[in-house]
Amino acid sequence: MPQQTGKMSPQLYARSCGILYLYIFVAGSFAELFVRSKLVVSRDAAATAANIMASESLFRFGFSGELLHLACDVAVAMLLYALLRPVDRNIALLAAFMRLACDIILATASLSHFAALHLLGGSEYLKAFQPDQLHSLALLAMKLHGDGYAISLMFFGFACISLGYLIFRSGYLPRTIGVLLAVAGPCYLINSFAHFLFPAMGAALFNAGILLPCFVAELSLTLWLLVKGVNVAKWGERVSQEVTAR
């Protein structure tokens, strides 16, 4: 295994990670800000149903883009593990597993997202339900997707804390980004637990921008990986230390 690590191109990994992370930003933001936030009316099932069916192509496009975003995030988990393993292999592995757990949970929650289309599609087997019942079930499906998203972000919060620690200690990525990610992690955790424990407070925190530090931290990491990559010389020193320690 040390031989494979030594031959790895850290800049190629960093740039690839940056490109994938940029897509994740675009697809995730589009699905949340321009699809769900525009179409789902929290307390109006009929309006939500009308919006989704009037913009079915948009709904499908946002859903599909977010599925691809999850596949990209699996690759990002691997790339970040490869880049940060020389700092602390166990914590890098923990960060990767937390990120993968987030992706699996969100992929599963996506079934609920797409279920809204099935409920509103007018299929023959749904004729036993009244239209208003189907509208309510579709809104419930979207709310369950939101709950699944909150659960996934709890795992992602732990991933951010782990990544922040690794980047801060790395020496080949900016410590500032490590600090930003270390701050982003608790923001994700607070947002998720408030969502379930104190819904009114959770909504207030979300509206107040509790996730803004997360956006800044992840965008900073993305742009740095795209533009600067890693300090190859210092990364090589870390790899040498890792090999020697073994």
Image (tube, grey):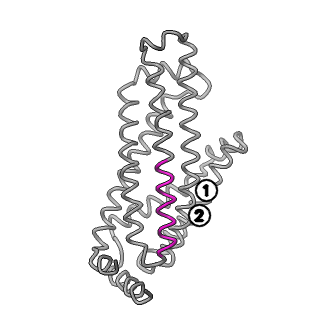
Figure quadrant of the N terminus = bottom left
Structural crowding at the residue carrying mark 2, measured as other residues with C-alpha within 10 Å and reported as few (<14), some (14–19) or many (≥20): some
Coordinates of residue 10 in the picture (x, y in percent): 31, 73
Q: Does 105 appear above or below 77? A: above
Task: In the rendered structure, find residue 162 and report the number of the disc placed on it.
Answer: none
| Amino acid type, label 2 | Val
| Amino acid type, label 1 | Cys
- What type of secondary structure mainly makes up the magenta span? helix
Structural crowding at the residue carrying mark 1, measured as other residues with C-alpha within 10 Å and reported as few (<14), some (14–19) or many (≥20): many
Coordinates of residue 11 in the picture (x, y in percent): 30, 72
- Outermost residue to the bottom: 244
Coordinates of residue 97 in the picture (x, y in percent): 49, 60
Task: In the rendered structure, find residue 183 and report the number of the disc placed on it.
Answer: 2
Asked where in the image residue 202 lies, by quadrant, the reply is top right
Q: Exactly how many numbered labels are in the figure?
A: 2
Q: Which residue is mark 1?
A: 187
10 sits to left or right of 185: left
For the residues bearing labels 2 and 1, Cβ distance under 8 angstroms: yes
The residue range painted magenta reads 89-104
Q: Residue at x 44, y 24 (%)?
A: 117
Residue 91 included in the magenta stretch of the image: yes
Figure quadrant of the C terminus = bottom left
Q: Residue at x 35, y 61 (%)?
A: 18
